[in-house]
Image (cartoon, rainbow, N blue to C red):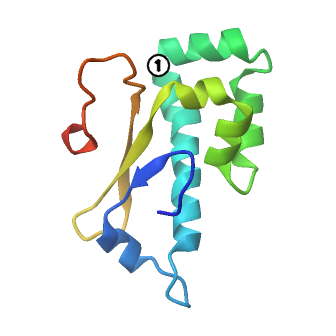
Amino acid sequence: MEPGPFRIKVPLLYIGRHLDENGFEFDECRQISARVAQYILGEYYASDEMLQLLVKERYPQGIESIKKEVLSSDAPCHTMWEHFKSIFDYFDDWAVVETDDVYEKITNIVVRKNQKGSKRRIETIDWK
């Protein structure tokens, strides 16, 4: 994927099936980046009490306001990194996109808490 704050691993066969009319992947990569931001600020946020506490302590405007700002931008992950750095820093800078067996649909997005300070970084191939 094109460089951004998160390094997003996506199966190449998925990208190959979602090229634009000129054979480029950029539009799909932007959409994937937006889905990563949406996942972090939605489903992941709802399930992680530590992230909820971090947002409450650092961002008095609350998660709904943050979601609105981030998801309405042309580059959601970049906006999260630029305007809500504590949320971005909460996560490892890698994200993994999982797809169905025929690489047509995204089935899951996997992000992990930042592993700074741990003895061994868990590689994305071992994220399950």
Whether residue 93 is situated above or below residue 118 in the rendered picture = below
| 71 left or right of 93 in image | right
Q: Nearer the viewer, residue 13 or 103?
A: 13
Residue drawn at x 41%, y 25% is 113
| 19 left or right of 76 in image | left
Is the C terminus in the top left, top right, bottom left or bottom right quadrant? top left
Q: Nearer the viewer, residue 122 or 111?
A: 122
Residue drawn at x 68%, y 9% is 57
| 107 left or right of 42 in image | left
Residue drawn at x 56%, y 72% is 26
Whether residue 110 is situated above or below residue 61 in the rendered picture = below
Q: Which residue is mark 1?
A: 48
Quadrant in the picture for residue 70: top right
The residue lying furthest to the bottom in this view is 22
Number of other residues with Cα within 10 Å of mark 1, as a class: few under 14, some 14 to 19, many 20 or more: few
Whether residue 88 is situated above or below residue 5 in the rendered picture = above
Quadrant in the picture for residue 105: bottom left
**Residue 125 percent location from the top left of the image:** 21, 45
Kind of residue indicated by mark 1:
Asp
